[in-house]
Image: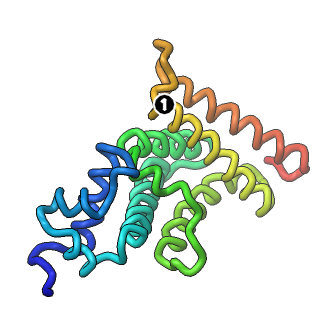
Amino acid sequence: MSPRAGLDTHTLVLAAAEIADEQGIEEVTLAALAARLGVRSPSLYNHINGLQGLRSLLAEHGLELLHAAIAAASEGLKGDAAVYAMGQAYVDFARKHPGLYETTLRAPEEGHSELERASEQVLSLIIGLLSCYGLDAEGELHAVRGLRSLLHGFAALENKGGFGMPLDTNISLNWLISTFIAGIRSMSSSTGTGQ
């Protein structure tokens, strides 16, 4: 059986990302993807390794887009300005791509080199943005975990309709990032490595 003309892995991933963002990641099935593309499900196996393979490709795609978004937002910025820009871009990505964003949350399984590479790119970028706060290597990793937790919690609550009060959520997000920055400044000062 030869692959359908014009159908390739990239096309499948983009179509699956659309389904994820419109309907949620759980609705990304091979049957739904085949229906969207107007093909039979078995023809998808010429390009992907089943549903798990598709989800891994989606996660890789999501991480690459997330990296591009936070890199563009923080380009040329340093210190607090870079962290604010990165945090806003992170949450904006989750707003724009709720299903695809969800695929980026899980740590990549060992041996999946492309997914590990994409995840490492995001991690390295965020560590680079936090390097000005004078934390040691372990402290930077804790700070990344903390920042990711704050941003994810905010994005998840917002995406699920958890902020019902008539307040600007971007102002709330800036307050949250300010609190994080104050916290890591305090951590670096208490260890004697702060600037």
Q: Secondary structure at mark 1?
A: helix
In this rendering, would 79 be left or right of 134? left
Q: How is the image coloured?
A: rainbow
Q: Nearer the viewer, residue 117 or 195?
A: 117
Residue at image x 49%, y 39%?
Answer: 88
Amino acid tagged 1: Glu
Q: Residue furthest top?
A: 166
In this rendering, would 39 be left or right of 118? left
Q: Residue furthest bottom?
A: 1
Q: Residues within 10 Å of mark 1 (few under 14, many from 20)?
A: some
In this rendering, would 42 be left or right of 169? left
In this rendering, would 187 be left or right of 164? right
Q: Does residue 10 sit above or below 189 in this rendering?
A: below
- The image shows residue 11 at horizontal and vertical percentages of 22, 67
- The image shows residue 55 at horizontal and vertical percentages of 41, 64
Residue at image x 37%, y 67%?
Answer: 51
Image quarter of residue 120: bottom right
Q: Does residue 150 sit above or below 19 in this rendering?
A: above
Q: Does residue 172 sit above or below 118 in this rendering?
A: above
Q: Nearer the viewer, residue 18 or 146?
A: 18
- The image shows residue 129 at horizontal and vertical percentages of 61, 53
Residue at image x 58%, y 44%?
Answer: 83
| Residue hosting label 1 | 158
Q: Nearer the viewer, residue 13 or 86?
A: 13
Image quarter of residue 106: bottom right
Q: How many marks?
A: 1
Quadrant containing the N terminus in the rendered view: bottom left
Residue at image x 65%, y 32%?
Answer: 178
